[in-house]
Amino acid sequence: MPEEHVLVIPARLIESIGSLAGFELDVDRYLQPILASDELSYRPRSQMELDPNFKQLIPYVVMQWTDPADGLARIFTYTRGGGGESRLHAKRSIGVGGHISSEDSEGVDDPYTTGMRRELEEEVSIDCPYVDQREGLLYDDSNEVGRVHLGVVHRFILDRPLVSSKEADLAEGEFLTVDELRSQFDRLETWSQLCLQALYK
């Protein structure tokens, strides 16, 4: 089976726009020039996982539903299984998504959105209407996973809490309140911690 080639951007291009650390709210300042750049390329995933000179672009979708009975926002969360990124195994997450693959660029004008939708369709069933809000960027160089990835945070505002996992890698899927997630803060992967702090102050 041929190796997956994933969408990457040179780190120096991001640095030329500005310094990124943690959660960046000014998403369009960075994302518009990144997606318009002729320096975007698809490279072997195994090489890119070890090369911080390139950042893999990752849609990271947070799914939120507000219960009309109590007015509290509830967020879809799950435990990562062993089949995906092994360095994140057994961490809790509030983000769903993954790499943009070279196959996502075939015959389309917007491989980023195509790849995001493909990843979501592979991982979860969303059986209700929703609104997609792009909220920010994630960059965390404190660990080896974060150093080679750039996350694009989307918040899906769901009409109803109708999300279910399609993969064993997304185990124990459920909707929890912000306070319930805060009580599990140390179990969350770093990107989820950053999202929780930035989106739910």
Image (cartoon, rainbow, N blue to C red):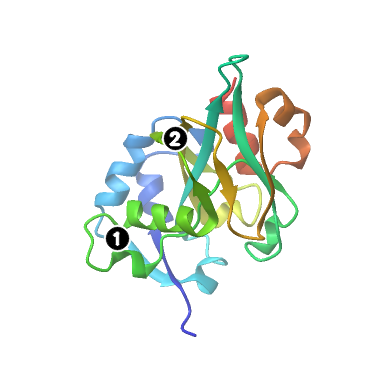
Q: Nearer the viewer, residue 114 or 26?
A: 114
**Residue 181 percent across, percent down from the top left:** 71, 31
Vertical arrangement, residue 138 with respect to residue 160, above or below: below
In the figure, is residue 121 to the left or right of 141? Answer: left
**Three-letter code, disc 2:** Gly
Tell me which residue sits at (52%, 60%) in the image: 52
Tell me which residue sits at (65%, 36%) in the image: 193
**Three-letter code, disc 1:** Glu
Please give the label number shown on residue 87. Answer: none
Spatial CA span between label 1 and label 2 = 21 Å
Q: Which of 72 and 152 is in front in this view?
A: 72
Tell me which residue sits at (67%, 60%) in the image: 168
Q: In which quarter of the image is residue 25?
A: top left
**Residue position marked by numbered label 1 in the rendering:** 39
> Which residue appears farthest toward the top when viewing the image?
70
Q: In which quarter of the image is residue 28?
A: top left
In the figure, is residue 146 to the left or right of 134? Answer: right
Q: Nearer the viewer, residue 141 or 45?
A: 45
Mark 2: which secondary structure?
A: strand
**Residue position marked by numbered label 2 in the rendering:** 136
